[in-house]
Image (tube, helix red, strand yellow):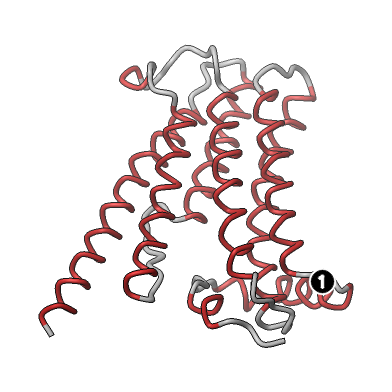
Amino acid sequence: MSVPEEHLSSRRVLSSRDSGWARALSAACVRAGLPPNVISIFSMVFAAGAWWIFMHAGDQTGGWIVAAWLGAIACVQMRLVCNLLDGMVAVEGGKGSPQGVIFNDAPDRVADVLILVGAGYSGAGEPGVVKLFDMLPLGWSAACVALGTAYARTLGAALTGKHDFSGPMAKQHRMAVLTVGALIEMGQHLAGTTRWGIQVALVVIFFGGLLTCWRRLRALAVQISEKQMK
């Protein structure tokens, strides 16, 4: 089945597509007959798992602390793996569909909100370290900015036909920062010290996302101006 041009143009450049493990997993999905749109839906399932675990991670004790935080991190990373595989199965595996462009993008918006909001609640009730943001719902704020970066990209695609995946806080960057923050938080939880890993990670995602929105919209404005001058 041919892949719509919109799907090809909306793919970000990822070096991980050329890795052996990604090719092996993609080939396995193709052999199993797993449609790429179903893989896209699974990304939301893993995001929901991360949300649920984040919501309860802060209340765990003993060995469950490690299990909870590592479980959340695993779900975040599996969300990204699904994001990688759906495109590979659709394009390289030749299993794309006309609706693929919808499934390629819409589930990501749900996944971002679930993961970032859940992360925000994982430290609820903890003494604030970044005092300036104690009254700011960081999870919700980071989620809103994440939606803003996606809006700036899709707006640009609608006006110019090109997707701008520039950072510094594109999807993979957000998940990387959150993963590091969760690892720090887990260590602080085990040590019984003040926990600030997730809080700082969400602050970085929030401001990095604002910068990403500005960069993408600024680049779009320049492109439109240059196009009108021709």
Residue 22's place in the image compared with 118, above or below, is below
Image coordinates of residue 28 in percent, x first then y, are 84, 74
Image coordinates of residue 207 in percent, x first then y, are 33, 40
Q: In the figure, residue 91 lies in which quadrant?
A: bottom right
Residue 172's place in the image compared with 205, above or below, is below
Which quarter of the rendering shows the C terminus?
bottom left
- Is residue 23 found left or right of 141 in the rendered image? right
> Which residue lies at the image location 69% right of the left edge and 68% below the top edge?
85
> Which residue lies at the image location 89% right of the left edge and 72% below the top edge?
32
Residue 111's place in the image compared with 219, above or below, is above
Q: In the figure, residue 20 lies in which quadrant?
A: bottom right
- Is residue 149 found left or right of 189 in the rendered image? left
> How many numbered discs?
1
Residue extending farthest to the left is 229
> Which residue lies at the image location 44% right of the left edge and 46% below the top edge?
146
Image coordinates of residue 29 in percent, x first then y, are 82, 71
Disc 1 residue type (three-letter):
Cys
The residue identified by callout 1 is 29
Q: In the figure, residue 75 lies in which quadrant?
A: top right
- Foreground residue, 95 or 184? 95
Residue extending farthest to the right is 32
Image coordinates of residue 174 in percent, x first then y, are 48, 48
Q: Helix or strand or loop: what does disc 1 sit on?
A: helix
Which quarter of the rendering shows the N terminus?
bottom right
> Which residue lies at the image location 66% right of the left edge and 52% below the top edge?
79
- Foreground residue, 13 or 10? 10
Within 10 angstroms of label 1, few (less than 14), some, or many (20 or more) residues? some
